[in-house]
Amino acid sequence: MARTGVFVCHCGTNIAKTVVCEQVAQAARAMPGVVYATDYRYICSAPGQQLIQEAIRDQNLDSVVVASCSPRLHEPTFRRCVEEAGLNPYLMEMANIREQCSWVHDDQALATAKAIALVRAAVAKVQRNEPLFSEQLPLTKRALVLGGGIAGIQAALDIADAGYEVLLVERSPSIGGHMAQFDKTFPTLDCAACILTPKMVDAASHPNIRLLTWSELESVQGYVGNFEVTIRQKARYVDAELCIGCAECWVRCPVKNVPAEFDEGLGPRTAIYVPFPQAVPLVPVIDKEHCRYLTEGKCGVCAKRCPKDCIRYDDEDKLSTEQVGALVVATGFDVEKGALYGEYGYGQYENVITGLEFERLVNLSGPTEGKVLRPSDQQPPQTVVFVQCAGSRDPAKGVPYCSRVCCMYTAKQVLLLKEKHPETDVYVFYLDIRAGGKNYEEFVQRVQDEFGAKYIRGRPSAIFPSGDKLVVRGADTMLGLPVEVEADLVVLASPILAREDAKDVARKLGLDTDQHSFFTEAHPKLRPAETLTAGVYLAGGCQFAKDIPDAVASAGAAAAKVVGLFAKDSLESEPMIAEVDEASCVGCLNCLEVCPFTAIEEKQIEDPRTKQVRTVASVNAAICEGCGTCAAACPSKCITVKGFKDSQLLAAIDILAV
Amino acid sequence: MTKTTTSATQTATTPWEPKIVGILCYWCTYAGADLAGSSRLKQAPNVRVVRVPCSGRIDPLFVLRAFARGADAVLVSGCHPGDCHYSKGNYYCRRRLSVFKRLLEFIGIPKERFRVHWISAAEGQQFAQVVNTMTEEVRRLGPFRWQEAAGAAAQQGIAGR
């Protein structure tokens, strides 16, 4: 026999003004299974909660209904309250007679009648509730950071500094990412390499960080706290343990004309190479497509020259499996190759380049040793035109968004150019100037005022050759006049895009991407570092285009989430989750198909009666969020959500429909 | 109009009031209803709410049961498609219930008595409006008598052959 206690709150006059609380309590006393009912001014107060706790003890209550404000406000309060009195917290239900009753109705009789109905429904439900308990799940306190750009490096350092082991996996031969390609960074004009390389070295030498470069994530199994990741370490053909980075091999390599990825193809590299001189680790890799020994069996100079005998032509990819508890995705972004507008002639005219390519030209370690020279004739340009929004903000080109960094890096590039070549004539075609960061606006103003760059508000419609120059035809919309500039070099601020294989990575991790392949965060405002996959977090440009300060901040946010996860001794599972009745489950796995969190797995059991092995559904308590989509999809009605079972919900509906 | 059946709150002599069962998702519409409450937006007291974690939890059985037990109308509401707190639950709800609406009509429950809305946690106004509009429309339709409606639908089915 149920022993339910009902507590009706006045909430001062908030409820009592419209709902006659004494009448509700009186009606409650007559409800089946209710052995105690009372009303009180403020049930959430200390004496109010005491009233509940005393009643639980004195009246031997086995279930409690609190008729008061919205459960969204005080459900945790009253759950804690009954738990302290020795009652399972899930044997407490609330009836919302304030937000959804007294505050919105005028007629006292009707409002009181509704309150009584809501209490009756809550009583019927709570009497069908079962005690629920959290499960303790194991937790591996190791993190994997996928991507070794500035965001990945920062996240790895933050997690490692907190005392946890980190695996930093990077697909190129060195960490550093795109930031390593930049010259000076806005708005401080810090040299990118100068501020990045100390962090790269920190990451490599940190006792808690294990660096796996030239490596890819092969697959991920498991769930939060218990991931099993398989990593492919690609064949380097160089023994990284022995290599001292002496450069004998790459200096001697006879293959000298492979377009260097790091220089955006503007300069060459060798077949055995490090991507840039400050590479971490300073261990080369052999490009097996271009190495003469690996393709034709000839040469072998590097092996002969290496003082430590590190070359391993017989090297193979290695697969290894690691256990981690959390993953931080920091796979970064790509810069579009400039060809979105055929009218701008990228790819057709050598002297039309992208912003990232310009960065390599102006950088001292680039293919022109920091001199800005026209690709066509290696001559310094007299007139340079920068075109902002060369593809971004254009839905017709599939890039409706603003790439966020181009206004700033264009201004920076103008400044660097004018510093080196003050006599150059510089024009910037822009639509808007988006300089919304700390000291950003001042920086752009400075470039316009101090450095004499001419900013023209308008968009070029065509770029075409005239002799050995390029004519940039556009409009100055502020003057309302067409404009033509004869340029020697044109720099297109092309869009920031998601990585080409972002969708593949997303699939491996069970993540969502938006229509532009940027990874989807759990909530765009309130949970930017998390995803809807528990234990997988986001940092940096893979979530959306962002500048370095934002990338570093987002990495810190992701690291904080990881450290917060690891701060517990074990994971407590949410009790109001799905549950399978294996006896009646037919193994159709409809539930597995519909689960938004891939929290349901196939399980083989031995039927206790027939001894045959059959398939049933199995819920992973660590991932299940308790939405109940499976419960509604089950044709056998054998999977349900604890706390929201059919029997419980129908009991409430039965009351409210009468 | 008076109902011939008695209930806990009405007798044979009290005027009939529409009885609407609302099944709301906790994260969006229930929160929107709370917001309507904090904003003191006046509503008809005819909608009584059962909360579910997600509109995806809603089994068509719940809707049928509400009508079978005496509801004059049923309101289902959840997060806007694309905004489900559990990412996809409301998509399944939408598909399931749009097919189900056709079945309801077939068995004699007119579509005006079963409404599916998508109301977010910020849309207190919309919630209050839906409650008031729906109550008035159901009031005009009158009390729902399942036996009569099912009988009429069956007759129609037979006549149509």
Image (tube, coloured by chain):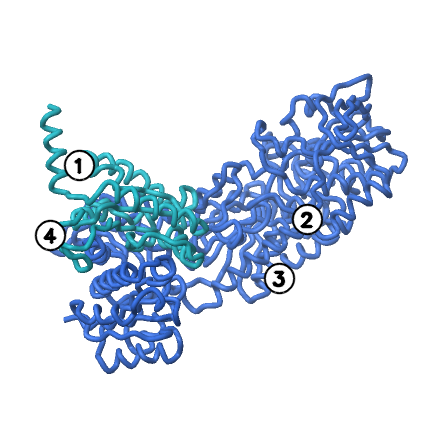
Mark 2 element type? loop
Quarter where residue A86 is shown:
bottom left
- Up-down relation of residue A107 to residue A309 (above or below): below
User: Which amino acid does the dot numbered 2 rest on?
Assistant: Ala
Quadrant of image for the C terminus of chain A: bottom left
Q: How far is mark 3 from mark 1, CA to CA?
A: 72 Å
Q: Position of residue B120 (x, y in %)?
A: 42, 48
Q: Earlier in the sequence, mark 4 or mark 2?
A: 2
Instruction: Give the residue number, with chain letter if any, for mark 1.
Output: B108
Mark 2: give few (<14), some (14-19) or many (20+) Cα within 10 Å: some
Disc on res. A279:
2
Mark nearest the camera among 1 and 4 is 1
Subunit under mark 3? A
Subunit under mark 4? A
Q: How far is mark 3 from mark 2, CA to CA?
A: 16 Å
Hue used for the chain lettered A: blue
Mark 4 element type? loop
Mark nearest the camera among 2 and 1 is 1
A125 vs A238, nearest the viewer: A125
Quarter where residue A128 is shown:
bottom left
Subunit under mark 1? B
Q: Is residue A156 found left or right of A115 in the rendered image? A: right
Q: Is residue A305 visible?
A: no
The count of marks equals 4
Disc on res. A206:
3
Mark 1 element type? loop
Instruction: Give the residue number, with chain letter if any, for mark 4.
Output: A610
Image chain in cyan: B
Subunit under mark 2? A
Mark 3 element type? loop
